[in-house]
C-alpha cells in the first residue's frame, strides 16, 4: 500500500511543509505519492516530482481548481483514497479545511497535528493547548493525519524526476464559490519557516508602534514578525501572524518574545523554538519560565537599545 | 430561519490540567468547566442574527453527560431559544459527534449550523467539516465575518497568510473563529430565567449512530519541559550570551 500527501501551494511554489511531509511519510516505508491540484500548475507538479523519496505525483488540473475549495479537493481525495494506507498533510489551515471533510466521507477517524509517528498506527499528539501529550492508536483502515510540520526536517531536492500522472478532474461540486482573498504582503521571510521570529504582544500599544518598534530589529535579523492573540484582536497585527494554539506554530532557531505574557495558548505555538528570549517588564511573567534568556526591562527602551547594539556590529 | 449551534463542555481555558496519578488520563475531577470558547462565538453570532431579524429560532445542542446542562443553560441565557442534550457516557470523538449532530440536523432541519472551529480540550478541529461532509452541505471554516442575504451567505475565513472570502447557499455549516464577534456577558436575571427553561434530553443510543471510539487512548504524559533558562541583567549581557550561543549570529 502507498502513502498519499496532499500538497499545498500558492500557485507559484510548493509550500515548504510539503517537503517536511515527505520526510514524515518515509516512516511507513511505502511508495510516497503527492497530490497536486490546481490550474496552470504544471511547474508545481514538476517541483513535487523533484523531491527525494517521492515515487509519483498525481496532478489534477482544472480551471475551477485555481482556488481550491474544501468540497472539491475532499472529493478528489476520496476518489483515489482506496489505493492508500496513509493520507497525510501539514496541519495548516488549508489541510485542516479539507482533510476532515474527506475523512468523514471515507468514514475514517482523522488524527490532527501529530507530533510523533510510532509503529502500529500509534501517534503522539498534544491536547489542552500543548499541556498534555497523548499516545493514541488508530483502528481504521486508512491512516488520515496532519503532522506538526516543525517536528520534521525538509526532504532534499533531487535531479531525476518522479513520474507525473495527470488525472482527470471530477465535475466541480459547485457547493461554494471563491470570491476573493487578501494576502498579507511582506518583504520579511515567511513566519512558519523563518530562522528568527520576533513576536509582539498587547503591550506594543498600537499598530504603528508595533511596526516602529519591532521592524528595525526584524530587518536587522532577517526575522519574521509574530504576534499574540491580544495584539491581533486589538488590531496591532494581522490575524495570520498570530502564534499559538489557534494560530501558527513556529520553531525557529531564535524566538524573541517582546512584551508577551506567555499564556499557554501562546507558548503552544513557539515552545519548540531552539532559543527563546523574553523581554518583559514583569519579572513574574510566565514567559520567563520557558525562556532561555530573560530580560526584565521596558521593551520601549530595550528593543531600540538591542537594535542599535546589533547594528553597530 | 432556524440556526443550530453545537456547544461542547470543556475544561476552562484558564485551568492547567493535570494527569491522573496512574497516568491513564487527564484528571478533570472537580475542575472548572466552561463552554468551549469558540462555541460561545457561535452562539453569539446566532443571537446577533436573531436580533437582526435574520434568524427566527436558535437551538443549541451539547453531547455528553448530564453535567452538560450548565453550558446549555448558559447558551439559553445568552439568547438561545431551545436546548437539547444528547446524553452519552462514551468518549465521543469528532467522527461520532458529527454523526450524532447529523441526525439532529436531519430532525431539526436548520438552515444554518454553527460550530466552533476547534475544541480546546482535544484541539482536533474536525467536527464542523465532518458534519458538512455527512450532510453534503457547503462548509465555511474559521470564519471571522458572516453576512447573510436571503439564501446567500458570504463568509470571510481566516487562513494562513491572510483571509479568503467565499459564497454559498443555505443550508450550510459554519465554524467560528474567535474574531467572529465578542460574546456578550450573561446577566444574572437571564441566567435565572434560563434555569427555569426545560432542556430536552435524548439518549445518544436512540439516534442509531455508531459512536464507538475509533482511536484508542494508550497513555497521557507531560510534554518534555524546556530546560530552565537564566535572567540577564542588561541588553549587553543578553547579546553576549546570545553571541556565545552556538549558531546564533548577531
Ligand atoms: C480559546 C483561546 C485561544 C487562544 N489562542 C491564542 C493563540 O493562538 N495565541 C495567543 O497568543 N493567544 C491566544 N489566546 C489568548 C491568550 O490566552 C492570552 O490572552 C494572550 O496570549 C495574551 O497576549 P499578550 O501576552 O500580548 O497580553 P497580556 O497577557 O496582556 O500580556 C502583556 C505583557 O506585556 C508586559 N508588558 C506591558 N508593558 C510592557 C513594557 N513596556 N515592556 C515590557 N513588557 C511589558 C506585561 O508585563 C505582560 O506580561 C487564546 C485564548 C483563548 C481563550
Ligand atoms: N460533545 C460535543 N457536543 C457538542 N458540540 C461538540 C462536541 N464536540 C465537538 N463539538 C463541536 O465541534 C467543534 C469542534 O470540535 P473538535 O472537532 O473536537 O475540535 C466544537 O467547537 C463544537 O462546536
Image (cartoon, coloured by chain):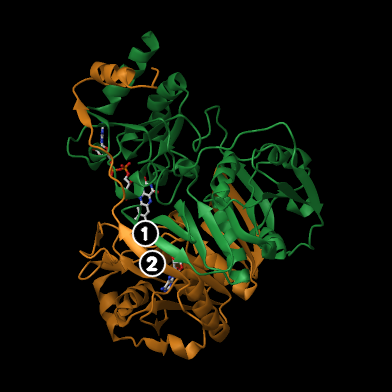
Chain colours: A green, B orange
Q: Quadrant of residue A11?
A: top right
Residue at image x 58%, y 69%? A104
Residue at label 1? A134
Q: Secondary structure at mark 1?
A: strand
Q: CA distance from mark 2 to mark 1?
A: 7 Å
Q: Position of residue B177 (x, y in %)?
A: 47, 57
**Count of marks overlaid on the render:** 2
Residue at image x 28%, y 82%? B195
Pointer 2 local density, CA inside 10 Å: few below 14, some 14–19, many at least 20:
some
Q: Position of residue A189 (x, y in %)?
A: 53, 29
Q: Secondary structure at mark 2?
A: strand
Q: Nearer the viewer, residue B57 or A266?
A: A266
* Contact check, label 2 and label 1, Cβ < 8 Å: yes
Q: Nearer the viewer, residue B38 or B181?
A: B38
Chain holding disc 2:
B
Residue at label 2? B217
Q: Quadrant of the C terminus of chain A?
A: top left
Q: Is residue A205 above or below residue A124?
A: above
Amino acid at each position: 500500500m502507498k502513502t498519499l500527501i496532499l500538497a499545498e501551494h500558492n500557485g507559484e511554489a510548493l509550500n515548504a511543509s510539503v517537503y517536511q511531509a515527505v520526510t514524515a511519510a518515509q516512516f511507513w516505508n511505502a511508495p510516497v505519492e503527492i497530490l497536486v491540484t490546481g490550474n496552470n500548475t504544471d511547474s508545481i507538479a514538476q517541483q513535487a516530482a523533484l523531491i527525494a523519496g517521492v515515487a509519483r505525483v498525481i496532478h489534477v488540473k482544472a480551471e475551477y481548481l485555481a482556488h481550491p475549495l474544501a468540497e472539491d479537493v475532499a472529493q478528489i481525495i476520496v476518489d483515489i483514497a482506496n489505493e492508500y494506507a496513509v493520507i497525510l498533510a501539514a496541519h495548516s489551515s488549508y489541510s485542516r479545511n479539507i482533510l476532515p471533510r474527506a475523512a468523514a466521507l471515507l468514514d475514517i477517524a482523522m488524527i490532527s497535528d501529530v507530533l510523533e509517528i510510532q509503529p502500529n498506527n500509534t501517534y503522539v499528539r498534544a491536547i489542552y493547548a500543548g499541556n498534555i501529550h497523548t499516545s493514541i492508536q488508530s483502528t481504521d483502515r486508512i491512516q488520515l493525519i496532519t503532522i506538526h510540520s516543525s517536528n520534521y526536517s525538509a526532504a532534499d531536492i533531487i535531479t531525476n524526476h518522479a513520474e507525473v500522472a495527470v488525472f482527470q478532474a471530477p465535475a466541480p461540486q459547485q457547493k461554494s464559490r471563491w470570491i476573493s482573498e487578501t494576502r498579507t504582503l511582506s518583504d520579511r521571510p515567511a513566519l512558519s519557516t523563518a530562522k528568527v521570529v520576533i513576536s509582539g504582544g498587547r503591550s506594543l500599544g498600537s499598530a504603528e508602534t508595533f511596526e516602529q518598534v519591532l521592524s528595525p530589529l526584524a530587518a536587522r535579523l532577517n526575522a519574521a514578525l509574530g504576534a499574540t492573540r491580544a495584539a491581533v484582536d486589538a488590531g496591532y497585527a494581522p490575524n495570520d501572524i498570530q502564534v499559538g494554539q489557534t494560530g501558527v506554530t513556529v520553531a525557529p532557531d531564535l524566538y524573541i518574545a517582546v512584551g508577551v505574557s506567555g499564556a499557554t495558548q501562546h507558548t503552544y505555538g513557539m515552545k519548540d523554538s531552539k532559543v527563546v528570549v523574553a523581554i518583559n517588564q514583569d519579572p513574574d511573567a510566565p514567559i520567563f519560565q520557558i525562556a532561555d534568556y530573560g530580560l526584565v526591562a521596558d521593551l520601549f527602551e530595550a528593543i531600540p537599545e538591542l537594535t542599535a547594539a546589533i547594528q553597530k556590529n | 430561519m432556524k440556526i443550530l449551534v453545537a456547544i461542547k463542555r470543556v475544561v476552562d481555558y484558564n485551568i492547567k490540567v493535570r494527569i491522573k496519578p496512574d497516568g491513564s488520563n487527564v484528571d478533570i475531577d472537580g475542575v472548572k468547566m466552561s463552554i468551549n470558547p469558540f462555541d460561545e462565538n457561535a452562539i453569539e453570532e446566532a443571537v446577533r442574527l436573531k436580533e437582526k431579524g435574520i434568524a427566527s429560532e436558535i437551538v443549541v445542542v451539547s453531547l455528553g453527560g448530564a453535567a452538560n446542562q450548565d453550558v446549555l443553560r448558559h447558551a439559553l441565557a445568552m439568547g438561545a431559544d431551545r436546548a437539547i442534550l444528547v446524553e452519552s457516557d462514551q468518549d465521543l470523538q469528532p467522527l461520532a459527534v458529527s454523526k450524532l449532530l447529523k441526525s439532529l440536523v436531519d430532525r431539526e432541519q436548520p438552515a444554518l449550523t454553527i460550530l466552533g472551529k476547534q475544541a480546546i480540550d482535544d484541539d482536533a478541529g474536525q467536527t464542523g467539516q465532518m458534519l458538512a461532509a455527512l450532510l453534503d452541505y457547503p462548509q465555511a471554516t474559521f470564519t471571522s465575518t458572516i453576512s447573510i442575504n436571503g439564501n446567500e451567505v458570504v463568509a470571510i475565513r481566516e487562513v494562513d497568510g491572510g483571509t479568503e472570502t467565499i459564497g454559498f447557499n443555505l443550508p450550510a455549516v459554519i465554524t467560528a473563529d474567535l474574531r467572529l464577534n465578542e460574546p456578550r456577558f450573561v446577566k444574572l436575571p437571564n441566567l435565572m430565567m434560563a434555569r427555569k427553561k426545560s432542556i430536552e434530553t435524548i439518549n445518544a443510543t436512540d439516534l442509531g449512530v455508531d459512536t464507538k471510539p475509533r482511536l484508542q487512548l494508550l497513555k497521557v504524559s507531560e510534554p518534555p519541559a524546556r530546560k530552565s533558562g537564566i535572567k540577564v541583567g542588561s541588553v549587553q549581557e543578553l547579546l553576549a550570551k546570545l553571541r556565545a550561543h552556538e549558531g546564533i549570529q548577531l
